[in-house]
Image (cartoon, helix red, strand yellow):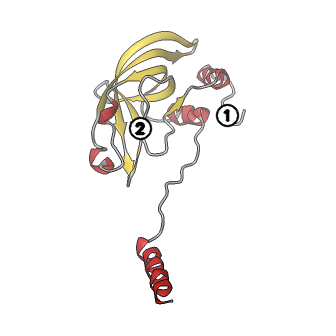
C-alpha cells in the first residue's frame, strides 16, 4: 500500500513540475493570399517555380534554433520566374535563405524539391526567401490549378484565395 501511495505521489509530482505542454499553432496559408500580400508590399517580390540547392546542415535545428536563426544560407535557385506570360522564363539565381525561429520551431525548406516561392529583393539587389516558423513564403509541389490561379493574379484577373 505504501508503495502505491509513493508511486502515485511521484507521478502527480511529475505532472505538476513538468508544466504545460507547448505547441506552435499556425494558420494554413494560401498561395493566392501570399501573392496578394507580396503584390501589396512596399518590397519588390518575384514568384519562382523550381528548386533550391543548398547545404541543409546550415538550417537551424531544434536544439540550437534560436541561436542559429540569424544565419543567412546561400542557395542556388533553378527554375522559372513568373511574368505576365506565366512561368515561362528560365532563371538560375543566387537566393539567400533567411530562417527565423520561435522557441524550438524554426522555418526550413527541403533542398531540391519543387516549390512555388515568393522571394523579395533586398536593397543591395540580392534575393531573399524568408523561412518563418509557419511557412507562407513557399509551397511544395504546387498543383496546376494553383499555378493557373497565380498566373491569373499576375495578369490582373480575378485573384481571390477562395476562387
Give me the residue at 63% from left, 24% from top.
143
Identify the mark at residue 63; answer none if there is no mark: none
Q: How many marks?
A: 2
The answer to whether the residues at label 2 and label 1 have Cβ atoms under 8 Å apart is no
Q: How far across and how far down the image is residue 71, in percent?
A: 27, 39
Q: Residue 108 carries which label?
A: 2
Write the residue at 33% across / 37% down.
59
Q: Residue at x 52, y 18 (%)?
A: 82
Q: What element carries label 2?
A: loop
Circle 2 packing at 10 Å, graded few (<14), some (14-19), many (20+), is: many
- Secondary structure at badge 1 equals loop
60 in relation to 90, above or below = below
**Residue at the (61%, 22%) spot, across then down:** 147
Q: Left or right: 151 with respect to 83?
A: right
Front-lying residue, 17 or 96: 17
Q: Residue 160 carries which label?
A: 1
- Quadrant where the C terminus sits is top right
Mark 1 nearby-residue class (10 Å; few <14, some 14–19, many ≥20): some
Q: Earlier in the sequence, mark 2 or mark 1?
A: 2
Give the image location of residue 36, x and y in percent: 57, 34
Residue 21, position as x, y percentages in the image: 48, 64
59 or 88: which is nearer to us? Answer: 59
Picture quadrant where residue 155 is located: top right
Where is residue 111? Give x, y as percent.
Answer: 41, 26
Q: In which quarter of the image is residue 14?
A: bottom left
* Depicted 97 relative to depicted 80: above or below: below
Amino acid at each position: 500500500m505504501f508503495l502505491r501511495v509513493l508511486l502515485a505521489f511521484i507521478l502527480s509530482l511529475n505532472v505538476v513540475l513538468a508544466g504545460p505542454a507547448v505547441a506552435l499553432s499556425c494558420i494554413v496559408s494560401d498561395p493566392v493570399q501570399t501573392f496578394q500580400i507580396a503584390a501589396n508590399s512596399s518590397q519588390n517580390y518575384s514568384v519562382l517555380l523550381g528548386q533550391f540547392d543548398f547545404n541543409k546542415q546550415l538550417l537551424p535545428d531544434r536544439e540550437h534554433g534560436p541561436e542559429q536563426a540569424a544565419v543567412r544560407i546561400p542557395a542556388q535557385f533553378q527554375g522559372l520566374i513568373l511574368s505576365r506570360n506565366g512561368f515561362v522564363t528560365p532563371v538560375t539565381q543566387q537566393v539567400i535563405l533567411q530562417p527565423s525561429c520561435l522557441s524550438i520551431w524554426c522555418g526550413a525548406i527541403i533542398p531540391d524539391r519543387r516549390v512555388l516561392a515568393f522571394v523579395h529583393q533586398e536593397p543591395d539587389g540580392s534575393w531573399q526567401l524568408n523561412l518563418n516558423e509557419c511557412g507562407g513564403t513557399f509551397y511544395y509541389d504546387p498543383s496546376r490549378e494553383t499555378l493557373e490561379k497565380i498566373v491569373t493574379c499576375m495578369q490582373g484577373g480575378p485573384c481571390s484565395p477562395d476562387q
